[in-house]
Image: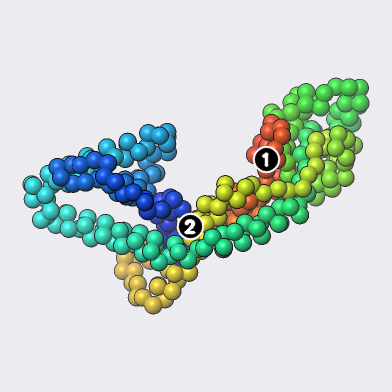
Amino acid sequence: MASALMGLAFVLPAQAQEDVPPKDDKTVAIVNGHEIKVSEVQMATDDIIGQLPDLPPKLRYPFVVEYLIERHLLAQYAVKEGIAETEEYKRRLALYQAKALRDAYFYQKIRPMVTEEEIRKVYDDEAAKLQQTERVRARMILVATEKEAEDIEARLAKGEKFEDLAKKYSLDGSKDYGGDLGYFTAAEMVPEFSKATFALKVGETSQPVKTDFGWHIIRLEDKKQGAAQPYDQVKAAIRNVLLRQKVGEVMQKIRAASKVEILDEDLKKYAEEAAKAAKNFQDTKQKPLDAGGAAAPAATDGGDTSGDDSGGKGDLQLPAQ
């Protein structure tokens, strides 16, 4: 359970990849003598970034400064009114102190473990894999019977538009895109479909192809080798995945050298279930380093984006392994 939960126990501080101390830590506001500096605004932004997703980037800075002004005003009045002497405050202080120490440990000890050279190596390795992978863009019309597929084939031969017939007759979700499946590799589709598709030349239309889903008419739109996104666009995401790995390694060592007791009987009862949920969460976070994942050097297609990688891959796409 410990190893499965450690990623949740030590979640990366928000926007860790952007943590660069300001060269000019100037004062941006003063609240009854307390100076709010750029470094404090930066830390506060990291702390509350999850509350700002819909706020335009240019408005975040003044928003966070105002947030800090109000926080310091309330804190100062809390001291005046004796709140700092209450048990409620002391309990909260202990909790926040632990968080502050954890975050400081992360920035000072763990974050430097991930080097520029390590990030670049992961990028280069994943980019090389993509360059070796052929990808195609195709359209498809899926029908239930061979007779229907033959009828579609005959109508195409007479000059009817593939896209129009797909929208009208196809049973697959890609019908809304005129049958466009976007770009995909052979491994992403069922074998019979991939074999027929990759055998076509650009612009060619297949004869009816049978799979477990039904009968398909396929037209090949484009064929190309994989290409990686620019390094600067994926560097931060790769760093975060590597940081999660480092956090896991550090937490494993720390927990092995520590004594952690679970006293709550209900908590013990659900510990196994919680460990499974935590592992699933960590697997999801790890996925970006897999081929084709968002944080790996994902493929870029360029040109016409009407059939991009995310659009139209309907029922044929194989489930993630």
* Numbered disc in front, either 1 or 2: 1
- Mark 2 residue type: Ala
* Residue 48 disc label: none
Mark 2 secondary-structure assignment: helix
- Mark 2 crowd level (few <14, some 14–19, many ≥20, 10 Å Cα): some
Is residue 12 among the parts visible in the rendering?
A: yes
Quarter of the figure that contains the C terminus:
bottom right
Q: Residue at x 67, y 46 (%)?
A: 299
Q: Residue at x 77, y 48 (%)?
A: 225
Q: Nearer the viewer, residue 163 or 47?
A: 47
| Residue highlighted by disc 1 | 309
Q: Earlier in the sequence, mark 1 or mark 2?
A: 2
Is residue 187 among the parts visible in the rendering?
A: no
Q: Residue at x 75, y 32 (%)?
A: 179
Q: Residue at x 8, y 50 (%)?
A: 82
Q: How many marks?
A: 2
Q: CA distance from mark 1 to mark 2?
A: 29 Å
Q: In x, y percent, where is residue 100?
A: 30, 58
| Residue highlighted by disc 2 | 277
Q: In x, y percent, where is residue 164?
A: 78, 23
- Mark 1 crowd level (few <14, some 14–19, many ≥20, 10 Å Cα): some
Q: Residue furthest left?
A: 81
Q: Is residue 100 left or right of residue 176?
A: left
Quarter of the figure that contains the N terminus:
bottom left
Residue 180 falls in which quadrant of the image? top right
Residue 207 falls in which quadrant of the image? top right
Residue 16 falls in which quadrant of the image? bottom left
- Mark 1 residue type: Asp
Q: Residue furthest bottom?
A: 257
